[in-house]
Amino acid sequence: MDNRKDQRTTSDVVMRGLAEAQFALYGYVCALTGRSQDARDILQETNLRICREAAKYDPSRPFLAWAKTIAVYEVMTYRKKQRRDRLVFDEDVFETIAAQTQSEEPEIDRNLGFLENCVKKLPARMRRVVEERYYGGLTVNKVADRMRCSPNAVSLILMRARQLLSDCVRLAAEKDRGYS
């Protein structure tokens, strides 16, 4: 009987923690994915997994750190499913943002700010392609039609943009931490 009571108590703690952490988890997943619609879908999967694994939660540990760990695994699962789409941000962008956002929620805004500033620094044509593809959610073919170029040209622009953004975010983070 005590075991059931402990499980109910842990479950209550997890449900309360989950309710309180929704905004922080959404921001975290959004920072890892870069797309709010994807983040909403991944957050739902994260919530389900947290509920399924509630019994594994150790109440002596911070809930948000545990939940973020689960969120990272859900993001990785999502990314594996998205591998068919060559236009997903490269691993280095994902890893840079993930590594920087695991500590505290205020850092999420800072990291998103880095990415936002880096996007603003892109050449105008490249920035437009990135914004239409990633912020607008358009397909490569649709972006190519709007830009009056081939889908291959759009793919090349996006590949170069991802590299520039990765370098820019990494340098901004290093500068912010006082490494340069």
Image (cartoon, rainbow, N blue to C red):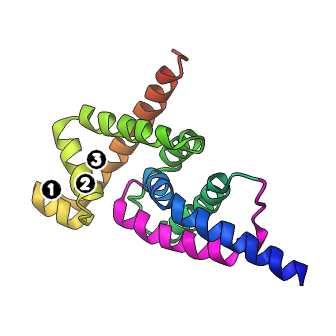
Locate residue 117: give its quadrant: top left
At x 64% / y 62%, what residue is drawn?
Answer: 70
Q: Do callouts 1 and 2 mark residues in contact (Cβ within 8 Å)?
A: yes
At x 59% / y 66%, what residue is drawn?
Answer: 16
In the rendered image, residue 23, in percent from the top left (x then y), is placed at 45, 57
Locate residue 138: give its quadrant: bottom left
Residue, disc 1: 149
In the rendered image, residue 88, in percent from the top left (x then y), is placed at 42, 58
Q: Secondary structure at mark 1?
A: loop
Q: Do callouts 3 and 2 mark residues in contact (Cβ within 8 Å)?
A: yes
* Inter-mark Cα distance, 1 to 2: 7 Å
Say which label, 3 or 1, has the lower sequence index.
1
Q: Residues within 10 Å of mark 1 (few under 14, many from 20)?
A: few
Residue, disc 2: 154
In the displayed structure image, the side of residue 106 where residue 141 appears, left or right = left
* Inter-mark Cα distance, 3 to 1: 11 Å
Magenta stretch: dominant secondary structure: helix
Residue, disc 3: 157
At x 83% / y 82%, what residue is drawn?
Answer: 4
Tell whether position 35 is magenta: yes
